[in-house]
Amino acid sequence: MAGEVSDPVDYAALADFRHALRMFLVFSERRAAEQGLTAQQHQALLAIRGAPAEQVTIGYVAERLVIKPHSASGLIERLEALGLVARSISESDRRQALIGLTPRAGELLEQLSATHREELLRLRPMFTALLTRLD
C-alpha cells in the first residue's frame, strides 16, 4: 500500500520531524510572549498581514487559524482591545467588517517575522534532511 509505514526507521524519521516542528513552535511561542502576545494572537496578526488586501474578515481569520468563527471573533476583540487591529466596514458589502492591522501591530509583526525568518533559515538544513529521510 502506498504511503505505508512499517519500518522503524520511518517511525524514527516521523518522530524526529514532529520534534523539530514542536521545537520551532516553542521558539515561536516564546518570541510572541516576549512581545506580550499569545501564539494564537501572533498567528492571527500574521494571517491578517499575509492576506490579500482588504479581504480579511472574521471568517478568513477562523479559516487560517483553523478555529470556529466565534473563537476568531473573540480573538479579534482581544486584539482590538490591545490596539493591534481595527475594524472597518466593507465598501462592497456594508454588512461585512474588514479587519486590518494598526501601525503598532505592524511594528510588532515586523520584529517577530524577522526573528522567525532567521530561525527558519537556520533550521532549513535540518528540515531538509528530515524530509529527505521520509523519501
Image (cartoon, grey):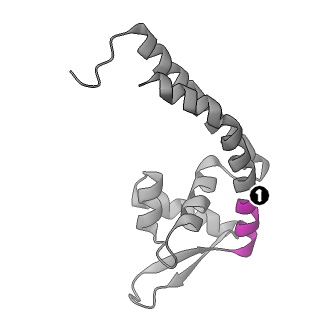
Left or right of 9 in this view: 25: right
Q: Is residue 78 above or below residue 5?
A: below
Determine if residue 75 is in view.
yes
Quarter assignment of residue 7: top left
User: Which image quarter is the C terminus in?
Assistant: top left
The residue positioned 45% from the left and 91% from the top of the image is: 91
- The residue identified by callout 1 is 111
**Where is residue 33 shown, x and y percent of the image?**
73, 46
Q: Residue furthest top?
A: 8
Q: Is residue 1 magenta?
A: no
Q: Which residue occupies the foreground of this view, 62 or 114? A: 114
Determine whether the residue tagged by mark 1 lies in a helix, strand or loop.
helix
Q: Is residue 106 magenta?
A: yes
The residue positioned 63% from the left and 47% from the top of the image is: 39
Q: Which residues are magenta?
A: 102-110
Q: Amino acid at mark 1?
A: Gln
Q: Which residue occupies the foreground of this view, 79 or 123? A: 123
User: Which image quarter is the N terminus in?
Assistant: top left
Q: Which residue occupies the foreground of this view, 18 or 44? A: 18
The residue positioned 61% from the left and 55% from the top of the image is: 41
Left or right of 45 in this view: 66: left
Quarter assignment of residue 114: bottom right
